[in-house]
Image (cartoon, rainbow, N blue to C red):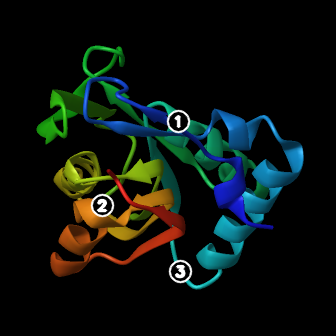
Amino acid sequence: MDLKDYIRSIPDYPKKGILFRDITTLIKNEKAFSFSINLMLKILKNYNFDKITAIESRGFIFASAISYILKKPFILLRKKNKLPADRYSVDFELEYGTATIEMHKDSIDPKDKVVIIDDLIATGGTAEAAAKIIEMSGGIVSNFIFVINLFDLGGCEKLIQKGYKVESLIEFPGH
């Protein structure tokens, strides 16, 4: 199965010049969604980890299914002011603005090995912020898994240069 066949491309969204790769067409197809989860599970057999994190919001879709199947704790990385308890916070830049992610301070124990899952990596700003927040808590980033790598925007390469292990299921150009 070629997962690329299940990704819709939307030009000029969320702003002019951005080519948005939409995963809703993948997740609405039960065979494509199951196939993507099974590919992630196959990748994860190569890693030792304690917990699964995902970046709000589309990363939650994939990570929650994997968490359920593997019976591993699922930790939310949320947008600013969405978590009620004491939290870590990291600001970062996106291709089209700035943002903040947060995580409850009691989510990750020191030395926990953590997988970070998201639907897409572009320039890597969000992923890099996710790694920072895991490390602020004393956790160790085991690896990243993305459904889509926008290979010409350099996000995966940036993470790899910083010593992180990075996997993606499919690749597209970002422009």
Q: Is residue 163 left or right of residue 113?
A: left
Q: Amino acid at mark 2?
A: Gly
Identify the residue at image location x=65%, y=66%: 40
Q: CA distance from mark 1 to mark 3?
A: 22 Å
Identify the residue at image location x=70%, y=69%: 39
Residue 58: assigned label: 1
127 or 23, which is in the foreground? Answer: 23
The mark closer to the camera, 1 or 3, is 1
The mark closer to the camera, 2 or 1, is 1
User: Is disc 3 surrounded by few (<14), some (14 to 19) or many (20+) residues within 10 Å?
Assistant: some
Residue under circle 3? 47
- When the figure is inspected, residue 138 is found, relative to residue 84, above or below; the finding is below
Q: Position of residue 124 (x, y in %)?
A: 24, 55
Q: CA distance from mark 3 to mark 2?
A: 15 Å
Q: CA distance from mark 2 to mark 1?
A: 23 Å
The residue tagged with tag 3: helix, strand or loop?
Answer: loop
Q: Position of residue 139 (x, y in %)?
A: 30, 61
139 or 128, which is in the foreground? Answer: 128
- When the figure is inspected, residue 23 is found, relative to residue 72, above or below; the finding is above
Q: Position of residue 169 (x, y in %)?
A: 58, 67
Residue 139: assigned label: 2
CB atoms at circles 1 and 3 under 8 Å apart?
Answer: no
56 or 113, which is in the foreground? Answer: 56
- When the figure is inspected, residue 154 is found, relative to residue 130, above or below; the finding is below
Q: Position of residue 20 (x, y in %)?
A: 43, 37
Q: Amino acid at mark 1?
A: Arg
User: Quadrant location of residue 162?
Assistant: bottom left
Q: Earlier in the sequence, mark 2 or mark 1?
A: 1
174 or 49, which is in the foreground? Answer: 174
